[in-house]
Amino acid sequence: MSAATIDLATARAAGVPAEIAVFSYYRNAEQHGANLLFRLLKHLDDPDAQIALSQHLADETRHAWLWTERIVRAGAKPLVVCDGYQVRMGRQAGMPRDVLDLLALTVVVEQRALRRYQHHLRRPNLDPDTEDVLKNVTKDEAWHIDWIRKLGRATAEERGEAKRFDDAIARYRAVDREVVEHLEAAEQELSGGATVD
Ligand SMILES: [Fe+2]
Ligand SMILES: [Fe+2]
């Protein structure tokens, strides 16, 4: 691990402010979300799906940039996160096998992002700058979830694999809950036991 890479467990020892670690994890999750979409681009031939995917991909990279700018405005630099949400998801759930798995994973990841940002928005003493960024990224997530879920269902039905798609979502959701539990516990420790969610 280089000096620039970090996980939540070591961030505290390194004296990293909790908010910089949290923003860096958000940034990391957005970048990995963009990577999932980039992989989907290669699997979907439908021109309308290509248009929506391009818009979606542009949104996720913009979200990562908004978090990057927020970190810089805080006078810090982004941490290179080595154990973020999606790395943990991949480790526990395994690599997606095909386009249905990729779509199911994207649905779960998007739902998690939305829920997490909505929880963060409800924190007391939220600073206006972070509130602006959270509102900005949150407003895109509803259509992301909606269209990816519809595309996943349609693709699964076309292939006669509706049940496999639903099962994949359930499987990724179970892993997501475990991963988030772990990350939130580490985050609480980092912020000195304060309630973070
Ligand atoms: Fe996003
Ligand atoms: Fe999204």
Image: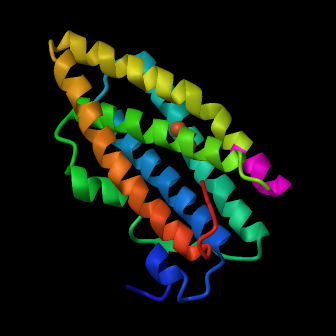
Image quadrant assignment for residue 135: top right
Q: Residue at x 47, y 42 (%)?
A: 112
Image quadrant assignment for residue 151: top left
Q: Is residue 62 visible?
A: no
The secondary structure that dominates the magenta segment is: helix
Question: Residue 155: x percent and y percent?
Answer: 27, 17
Q: Is residue 17 above or below residue 14?
A: above
Q: Is residue 149 above or below residue 66?
A: above
Q: Residue at x 32, y 22 (%)?
A: 152
Q: Find out whether residue 131 is within the magenta segment.
A: yes
Q: Nearer the viewer, residue 118 or 94?
A: 118
Q: Which residues are magenta?
A: 125-134
Q: Residue at x 39, y 37 (%)?
A: 108
Q: Residue at x 48, y 28 (%)?
A: 145
> On the picture, is 93 further left or further right than 197?
left
Q: Nearer the viewer, residue 55 or 137?
A: 137
> On the picture, is 33 further left or further right than 161?
right
Q: Is residue 84 above or below residue 157?
A: below
Question: Residue 24: x percent and y percent?
Answer: 57, 65
Q: Find out whether residue 179 is within the magenta segment.
A: no
Q: Nearer the viewer, residue 68 or 9?
A: 9
